[in-house]
Structure formats: structure tokens, C-alpha cells
Image (cartoon, grey):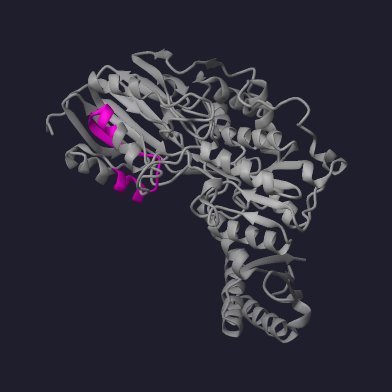
């Protein structure tokens, strides 16, 4: 590595997508120009109680908004486009992407009333987008959603290849395999750095072709005697097409359930990415008009999401459909890390309903990943032949394993950069280093609130969820140092007051003694009185129950 740091470097700054799977956002900066690749969201983990979604912290981009030339999107999955509405409300820049990707973005912009304010530009694989000094060529790749692209980012310091999310499937559902020839051409012309998908780097071999799933569906559909319910990711358009094809082959009608599923089918059908033969698509409200052996329902809920259509069916809460003994339920997905428990719960509920359930642990061919395994990654590395390598799109273990794979292929360890969100990777044709950081992290979205819930609020929610709340109401005399009403105690999520009279009586006595002690010392500061209540009651409750509920004193004067 050259120790001399040239003046004009390209800066690559990931603000999301490293050490996590979600909220992908990468900044490419050269002098006074910035181009952004993707702007996604992530879903909250178990510690983020009540949070709806998580988006990247874009403080750095807000400070440099005048430099931004545009956002270019790799594909239409939520972890790559879901953060756009929140970004665009703060920084309005042009959006570039393929037809289906921008079709899905259009729905989001309309929902957030941004459709008339934001300019979108449809491009196709093979097109080149010029944004200032950056020239970005879109390269066709295979993934679990149509119109996915990788990118050649031609910069003044050299060429950067970003694979996007990809796999190598020579027999894809849409007939458009990854453009390996273009990757090879780019590699032969010299590539400064490769940024590649790391999601499945731990899996040896190759990703199975999607066509095997279609054959499995045909076999299952032909043997099913009653209704068939297939749970899948609504964004997996290829899978939806396979469900439609299998239904048509078996002379069954198909209905779609779940808001995101219905929206995806609408957009994909209008744009020509799903072909539904005439006469087989019915509304979910009409399924009871047909015999059970003529019905297929494609639904959301493959990850056990609490409000999804499949979970509502399993809990007998779905308005249009109740599961029956003998129905066949196919879980056509694999577990996103962290969702294993919720998926296990939904499978147990389905078994209790008496349905015939088929999922990945029982039959591998009901789902195929959209991400490249080891041999596919090796092929891309070998074709592109980069000088530097930056693994992306994965948790730390994925990035580290991908770095090892690059070393196994002959790359020097000094030329591999395992970054974190906020790291700045500076590089030139004979220089590269990763040193400084910029503000990064996550912003929590709760309802209509964006960023108004932070670690302190989450900590309070955790305490409330584990130990509950005690509200203490007491009224003091304005003129005399004495209590004239209370203390009264309201318990929520801690104990049931009517069944804990001894504990409550003791608590009231402790509170009264603590307040009287303060008043005897003529100390009527609100903060002192509240602290006395919290400390004395907290000690008493812990001694009696070994629990620490949140204590909220309310002190009035009369």
C-alpha cells in the first residue's frame, strides 16, 4: 500500500448495510459531488419495543446536501428503497432506477404526498447515468425480484463495481440471467474496487435455481385435496408468478391476501412483471363461492409477522378466511435472522389448526435464496479482478468470511476493508485507507414520529414491559407542612392492587414517612420530594418482590 495520501481521493461512506442486513445506503463522494446508492430501511429488533421501522442517520448528507447529485437504486426491496420517503422529506434529489423499482417507489411517494415534488428517472440494464463526474452503468443481475441491477461506478480515480443483491441463476423465471459477460469485460479493463453482497457467503456451493421451486409447487398443488395457502415475501415477484402458474396448471382460482401482497401484485401486473391468465384471479372476499379444491391463496406472513394475513388466519382473526383441517399451507421462505422464534410460533399454531404444513425444514425445494453462495461469489471476484475489496450487505460475520474468501482467491489482506457504518474509505489508483468516521447509526420511526424515540425512551419501555409502573398521587397543604390527601397508588403491569393489599398498605406507609421526613426539614423542593418517594418506595418494593417497577410520583398542593 502506498503511504502517500493523494489530495483528490474518492470517498466511499456506508451509512447503512454493514454489520446488519437492512437500511442499505452508500455514499460516493469526489470533491464537491456526491452520489448515493440505495436508501433502505431495517425492521426493529426485539429490544426496540413499539418501533415500526429503522432508517439510516443522514446527518452527514444533510450537512452536504448541496453536493448530492442523485440517488441510484439497485432494486425494489424494502431494505434498499424503504427509507426514501423519510430521506426525501429532508433532501429532495432526483431518483434513478429500473421500471419495477420506480413503480414500487411511486407508491411510497404517493403515500407520503411526495409524488409531485420528487423527480424519478426510469433506466434499464445497460444504460449509463451521468451525475456530475460520476458515470454509473446499470448491469443486469439475478435476484428474487425482477429488474435488479449491479453497477459500474466510473469515477475520476477509477472504476468501482457494486454487485447489488445478486445470485447467478442461468435459468431464471423471467429469462434474463445475470450479465456475466459485462462483468468480465469490466474486469479486463481494470477495476479499482469491488463491493459485493455477503449475505450467503457462509453457504458453500451454488444457489439453487428458482425453477426447482416451480416444479415443487406443481407437484404439491396436484396432490392437494383442499385449499392451498402459500406464504411468501410479497416482494418476491418471481415466486408469485410461480404460484400463479401452478394454480393455472391445476385449474384453481388464485386470491391474494395482505396489503403489501395486494399492492405488489397490482404494480407488477400493471408494469408487466406478473402475468395472470384471464379468469383465475379472484378477490379474497369471494373464495367461499368456490369449492375448496379450486382455491389458492397467496399471502403475507412467511416470517410470522404479528399483523400479517397468515398469522391472522392462524389466530382465527382473518375476516375473509378461516383455516380448516386438510388445508395445505406452504411457507415459501427462509427465516430472516432474528425471526426464528416467531416463525416457530406460527408453525405451531398452524399444526394446531390441523392443516398440512410444508416449510423449509421439511422440504428444501419450497424456497430459494436470492443471494449468491460461495462459488458464485468466487466467480464474480475472478471475473472482476479488483485491486481493492469491500464486502457489504451482511452482519460482521458475513463480512469477515467474505474477506477470507477474497484472501483465498489471492487478494492481499491489506487491500481488503471490513468497514462499519460511518467509516470513510478513501482510495485512489495507488492508495487506499479507512480512518475517519462520519455521524451514522439509526433513526427510529414510531407511528408518525421520526427520531423522537431514542435510547432513553426505549430503556423506559423495557422497564415498563418487564416490571410495570407504579403511579403515586399525594396532595400537600400549601400553608402547613403536612399531607392532606393520599398517598394513593395506581399499579399497571406490576401487581393487581386488590390482591396485594398488604404490599400496598406497606408502600403507602413508607411513602408517607419519607414525605413527612422532608416536610419536617421544611424541604418542599419538588425534585427532593419526588426523589424521596422514588427511593423509599423503590427500596420497599424490591425488598418485598425483588422487582423494580417504574415509579411516577404526582405531587399536588392545595
Counting from the top left corner in percent of width and height, residue 521 is at 59, 77
Residue most toward the bottom?
Answer: 502
How many numbered circles are shown?
A: 0
Which quarter of the rendering shows the C terminus?
bottom right
What residue is at 80 percent from the left and 35 percent from the top? 283
Front residue (pair 401, 3): 401
Percent x, y of residue 459: 54, 59
Q: Position of residue 374 (x, y in %)?
A: 33, 43
Residue furthest right in the image: 289
- Does the stretch in magenta take in 383? yes
Is the N terminus in the top left, top right, bottom left or bottom right quadrant? top left
> Going by the image, does 258 lie left or right of 520?
right
The residue that appears at 66% across and 78% down in the rendered structure is 511
Q: Looking at the picture, does residue 219 appear above or below residue 158?
A: below
Residues 10 and 376: in front is 376
Is residue 440 toward the left or the right of residue 298 in the image?
Answer: left
Question: Magenta stretch?
Answer: 381-402
Q: Of residues 545 and 391, which is closer to you in this image?
A: 391
User: For residue 356, what is the image quadrant?
Assistant: bottom right
Q: Is residue 99 magenta?
A: no
The quadrant holding residue 104 is top right
Is residue 435 visible in the rendered image? The answer is: yes
User: 496 above or below 379?
Assistant: below
Q: Taking 66 as reference, is 285 left or right?
A: right
Is residue 41 at least partly visible in the picture? no
The residue at the point 43 percent across, 43 percent down is 441
Say if 437 sits above or below 491 in the image: above
Is 493 situated left or right of 214 in this image? right
Q: Nearer the viewer, residue 371 or 277?
A: 277
Amino acid at each position: 500500500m502506498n503511504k502517500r495520501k493523494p489530495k483528490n481521493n474518492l470517498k466511499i461512506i456506508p451509512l447503512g448495510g454493514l454489520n446488519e442486513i437492512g437500511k442499505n445506503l452508500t455514499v460516493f463522494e469526489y470533491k464537491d459531488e456526491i452520489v448515493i446508492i440505495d436508501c433502505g430501511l431495517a425492521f426493529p429488533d426485539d429490544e426496540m419495543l413499539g418501533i415500526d421501522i429503522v432508517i439510516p442517520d443522514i446527518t452527514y448528507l444533510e450537512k452536504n446536501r448541496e453536493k448530492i447529485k442523485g440517488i441510484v437504486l439497485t432494486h425494489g426491496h424494502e431494505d434498499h428503497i424503504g427509507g426514501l420517503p423519510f430521506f426525501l422529506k429532508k433532501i429532495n434529489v432526483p431518483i434513478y432506477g429500473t421500471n419495477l423499482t420506480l413503480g414500487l417507489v411511486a407508491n411510497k411517494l404517493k403515500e407520503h404526498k411526495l409524488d409531485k415534488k420528487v423527480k424519478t428517472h426510469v433506466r434499464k440494464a445497460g444504460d449509463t447515468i451521468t451525475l456530475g463526474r460520476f458515470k454509473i452503468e446499470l448491469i443486469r443481475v439475478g435476484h428474487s425480484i425482477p429488474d435488479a441491477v449491479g453497477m459500474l461506478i466510473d469515477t475520476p480515480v477509477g472504476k468501482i463495481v457494486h454487485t447489488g443483491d445478486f445470485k447467478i441463476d442461468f435459468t431464471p423465471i423471467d429469462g434474463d440471467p445475470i450479465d456475466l459477460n459485462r462483468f468480465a469485460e469490466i474486469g479486463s479493463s481494470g477495476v479499482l474496487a469491488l463491493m459485493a453482497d455477503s449475505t450467503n457467503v457462509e453457504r458453500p456451493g451454488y444457489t439453487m435455481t428458482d425453477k426447482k421451486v416451480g416444479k415443487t409447487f406443481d407437484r404439491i398443488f396436484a396432490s392437494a385435496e383442499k385449499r392451498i395457502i402459500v406464504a411468501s415475501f410479497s416482494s418476491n415477484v418471481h415466486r408469485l408468478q410461480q404460484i400463479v402458474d401452478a394454480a393455472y396448471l391445476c385449474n384453481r382460482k388464485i386470491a391474494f391476501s395482505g396489503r403489501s401482497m395486494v399492492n405488489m401484485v397490482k404494480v407488477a401486473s400493471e408494469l408487466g412483471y406478473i402475468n395472470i391468465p384471464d379468469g383465475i384471479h379472484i378477490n379474497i372476499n369471494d373464495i367461499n363461492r368456490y369449492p375448496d379444491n379450486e382455491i389458492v391463496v397467496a399471502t403475507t406472513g412467511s416470517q410470522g409477522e404479528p399483523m400479517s394475513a397468515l398469522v391472522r388466519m392462524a389466530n382465527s382473526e382473518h375476516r375473509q378466511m378461516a383455516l380448516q383441517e386438510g388445508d395445505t399451507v406452504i411457507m415459501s421462505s427462509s427465516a430472516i435472522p432474528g425471526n426464528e422464534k416467531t416463525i416457530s410460533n406460527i408453525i405451531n399454531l398452524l399444526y394446531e389448526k390441523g392443516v398440512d404444513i410444508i416449510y423449509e425444514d421439511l422440504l428444501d425445494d419450497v424456497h430459494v435464496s436470492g443471494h449468491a453462495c460461495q462459488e458464485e461469489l468466487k466467480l464474480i471476484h475472478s471475473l472482476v479482478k479488483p485491486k481493492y475489496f469491500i464486502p457489504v450487505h451482511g452482519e460482521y460475520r458475513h463480512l469477515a468470511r467474505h474477506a477470507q474468501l477474497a484472501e483465498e482467491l489471492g487478494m492481499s489482506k491489506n487491500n481488503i476493508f471490513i468497514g462499519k457504518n460511518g467509516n470513510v474509505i478513501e482510495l485512489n489508483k495507488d492508495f487506499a485507507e479507512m480512518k475517519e468516521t462520519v455521524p451514522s447509526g439509526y433513526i427510529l420511526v414510531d407511528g408518525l414520529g421520526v427520531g423522537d424515540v431514542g435510547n432513553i425512551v426505549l430503556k423506559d419501555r423495557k422497564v415498563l414491559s418487564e416490571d410495570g409502573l407504579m403511579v403515586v398521587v399525594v396532595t400537600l397543604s400549601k400553608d402547613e407542612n403536612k399531607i392532606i390527601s393520599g398517598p394513593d397508588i395506581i399499579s399497571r403491569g406490576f401487581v393487581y392492587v386488590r390482591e396485594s393489599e398488604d404490599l400496598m398498605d406497606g408502600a403507602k406507609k413508607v411513602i408517607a414517612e419519607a414525605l413527612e421526613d422532608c416536610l419536617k426539614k421544611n424541604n418542599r423542593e419538588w425534585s427532593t420530594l419526588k426523589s424521596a418517594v422514588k427511593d423509599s418506595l423503590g427500596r420497599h418494593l424490591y425488598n418485598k418482590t425483588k422487582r423494580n417497577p417504574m415509579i411516577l410520583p404526582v405531587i399536588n398542593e392545595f
